[in-house]
Image (cartoon, helix red, strand yellow):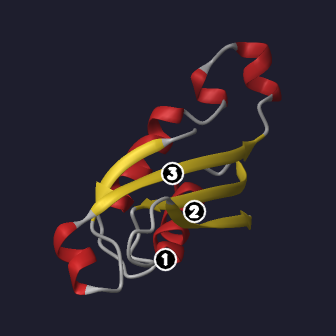
């Protein structure tokens, strides 16, 4: 899933927790889809709607670190879907407080394997 956009309240500074910001998520989930390719059945894969719901729920839980948010999302994906073999997740914050006049994205990428 690419370019999921959420408004959330993650950050170390008090202002980040009170004002909030937009975050962009990219999530790549490795799943063996060979059976789904043959059966055309949703039950043989992982629904992107379910992945989105997990990301949305975890983005609503305020954290200081994006690493923590990404870790929680990965943990939930592994817990809820036994077929998930690996997860790559990138979380980027728009207009992060990195300096006067600085614009752009600041973020992390987490790669996990079951």
Q: Earlier in the sequence, mark 3 or mark 1?
A: 3
Q: Residue at x 65, y 51 (%)?
A: 82
Where residue 7 sits, quadrant-wise, is bottom left
How far across and how far down the image is residue 91, in percent? 52, 60
Residue position marked by numbered label 2 in the rendering: 74
C-alpha gap between disc 3 and disc 1: 14 Å
Q: Earlier in the sequence, mark 3 or mark 2?
A: 3
Residue 92 in the figure: left or right of residue 5:
right
Give the mark toward the camera: 3 or 1: 3
Where residue 31 sits, quadrant-wise, is top right
Q: Earlier in the sequence, mark 1 or mark 2?
A: 1
Residue position marked by numbered label 1 in the rendering: 68
Position above or below: 23 against 3: below
Question: Which of the two residues, 43 or 96, is positioned nearer the viewer here?
Answer: 96
Q: Which residue in the rendered view is the most extreme toward the right?
A: 34
Secondary structure category for the residue under label 3: strand
How far across and how far down the image is residue 100, in percent? 38, 76
C-alpha gap between disc 3 and disc 2: 13 Å
Give the mark toward the camera: 3 or 2: 3
Residue position marked by numbered label 3 in the rendering: 25
C-alpha gap between disc 1 and disc 2: 10 Å
């Amino acid at each position: 899933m690419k370019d999921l956009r959420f408004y959330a309240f993650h950050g170390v500074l008090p202002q980040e927790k009170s004002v909030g910001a937009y975050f962009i998520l990219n999530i790549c989930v490795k799943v063996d889809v060979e059976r789904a390719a043959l059966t055309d059945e949703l039950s043989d894969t992982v629904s992107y709607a379910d992945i989105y719901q997990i990301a949305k729920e975890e983005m609503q839980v305020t954290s200081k670190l994006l690493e923590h948010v990404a870790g929680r999302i990965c943990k939930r994906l592994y817990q809820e879907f036994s077929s998930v073999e690996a997860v790559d997740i990138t979380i980027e914050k728009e207009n992060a407080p990195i300096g006067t006049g600085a614009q752009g994205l600041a973020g992390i990428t987490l790669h996990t394997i079951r």
